[in-house]
Image (cartoon, rainbow, N blue to C red):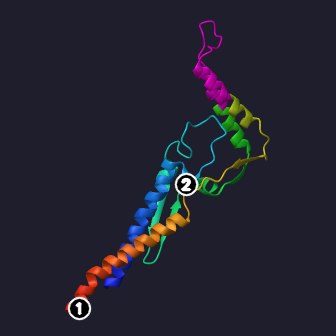
Amino acid sequence: MSDIDALLRKIIKDIRVNVADEFDKNFQRQSFFGEAWKRRKSPVGGQSILIRSGSLRRSITATSNDTSVTFSSSEPYAAIHNKGGEIVVTDKMKKFFWSKYYEAVGGFGRKKDKTLRKDKRNVRLSTIAEFWKAMALMKVGSTITIPKRRFIGTRPKLEEQVKAIVTENIEEFLKNEIPKMIVK
């Protein structure tokens, strides 16, 4: 393996590691390099966007060869979140929505006389239940719009980081190799 091949491998490895770290940080920042992700309309899921189980975040992988690095996700829903788009409501989805509605309603706290308690938990659950009910009442064939929340892709800031990695590696290579060439 020549010195140039070793340099290229090191550059590709450094790019893969640094860019993967930046894509992971997008989940922490809840934005794509400063472009904030659109907030959720639904009351379901808590504060973090795109992080419920963490499987989307963990699914991002990098593959590289001698000249490039490619980032991808194995999760089937990754593309719709990264690019945005519409999904069509199916009968199976409606059954899922009804299931979630009944799950939320079943969690209501009740008094001994079986009437609902008027506490914060029940208020939150009623909001969630209403959301799932509205989703379940959607007609088959109607569409749900998923906003674009990029977590993988190129940006000028990322391109600058890649250029800095390449420059740093080349400068280090030249600093170490030129004295060796002069001595010979």
Q: Residue at x 49, y 57 (%)?
A: 23
Disc 1 versus disc 2: distance between alpha carbons? Answer: 46 Å
Provide the residue designation for mark 2: 34
Point out residue 14 in the picture as x, y percentages from the top left corner.
38, 68
Q: Nearer the viewer, residue 34 or 85?
A: 34
Residue 183 included in the magenta stretch of the image: no
- Quadrant of the image occupied by residue 16: bottom left
Badge 1 element: helix
Quick check: 172 above or below 94? below
Magenta residue check for 103: yes
Residue nearer the viewer, 150 or 157: 157
Q: Tell me which segment is drawn in magenta.
A: 101-129
Is 6 left, or right, of 30 in this rendering? Answer: left
Kind of residue indicated by mark 2 = Gly
In what element is the residue under mark 2?
A: loop
Residue name at image x 66 percent, y 25 percent:
126
- Write down the quadrant of residue 1 in the picture: bottom left
* Location of mark 1 (residue): 182
Residue type at mark 1? Ile
Q: Residue 109's x, y, as percent?
A: 59, 17
Report whether residue 154 is seen: no
Q: Earlier in the sequence, mark 1 or mark 2?
A: 2
> On screen, 17 above or below 137?
below
